[in-house]
Amino acid sequence: MHIMEGFLPPMWAAIWFLLSGIVVIYGIIQLNKLIKDKPEVKPTLALAGAFMFILSSLKLPSVTGSCSHPTGGGLGAVMFGPAITAVLATIVLLFQAILLAHGGLTTLGANIFSMGIMGPAIGFLVFKLLKGKLNITWVVVLAAIFADWGTYVTTSIQLALAYPLPDFGTALANFGTVFAVTQIPLAIMEGLLTGLIWDYIMKLRPDLLAKLGLIEPAKAEGGAE
């Protein structure tokens, strides 16, 4: 999913920087407020960021100018919302671009928008829609799967907008088809792994999930939901 350095035309690189910058600034405000109100969530924030960094570093070759891998954005989106997850993704993507040559600095805005904003936003929406209707762990699993798929649909759109050859619709179908080969099974595996991490947090610190409003306080006192 990481679009490599220099692959996007300057106009599109600037547009994605602008859009992502607005969300990341809002996310920083939300993050500062969260840490001030609930400083005990810092270890869980670090866990969500580390989870994203590790999973999104496991890249496979894919379409020209990009790659395929899990994204790790679903866990952060479920626990802290898409704006704060955008801040975590910015840190992750910046380090990956500088230290691992994974992605790039000129394409950082586009990569933040797909992996740090749109993917988590879709995962967060799935979580909100299904919460209370299914077992909470399976809701998290589905949220992580759709966050992953949402990221790759967004990347396909970004690439098709930059290189609409022979036209936008055909380019979108081509990029999306190539991504789908690897990303459909990868997203399912990522969802299941995210569910395991969620269950671990539920057993270890259900009180934190209750403070974040993710589970009922009574259920936190009684253990995993």
Image: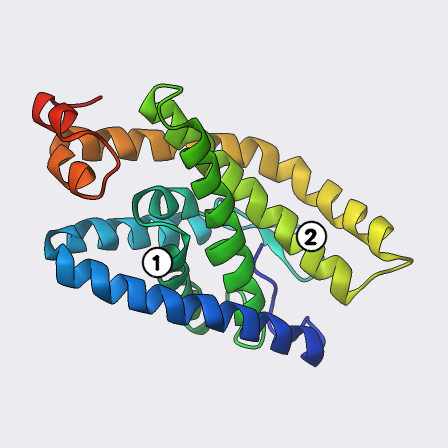
Looking at the rendering, in which quadrant would you find the C terminus?
Answer: top left
Residue occupying image coordinates x 34% and y 30%: 195
Answer above or below: position of 178 versus 118.
above
Task: Say whether residue 35 is left or right of residue 148.
Answer: left
Q: Position of residue 4 (x, y in %)?
A: 60, 67
CA neighbours of label 2 inside 10 A, class few (<14), some (14 to 19), many (20+): many
Q: Position of residue 201 (x, y in %)?
A: 20, 35
Residue occupying image coordinates x 10% and y 21%: 222
Question: How far apart are the alpha carbons under marks 2 and 1?
Answer: 24 Å
Looking at the rendering, in which quadrant would you find the N terminus?
Answer: bottom right
Q: Amino acid at mark 1?
A: Ile
Helix or strand or loop: what does disc 2 sit on? helix
Dot label at residue 156: 2
Instruction: Name the residue beneath numbered marker 1.
Output: 84
Answer above or below: position of 81 versus 29.
above
Dot label at residue 191: none
Task: Say whether residue 182 is left or right of residue 32.
Answer: right
Q: Position of residue 202 (x, y in %)?
A: 19, 31
Using the rendered image of the protein, determine whether residue 72 is visible from the camera's viewpoint: no
Are the residues tagged 2 and 1 within 8 Å (C-beta)? no
Q: Amino acid at mark 2?
A: Ser
Helix or strand or loop: what does disc 1 sit on? helix
CA neighbours of label 1 inside 10 A, class few (<14), some (14 to 19), many (20+): many
Between circles 2 and 1, the one closer to the viewer is 1
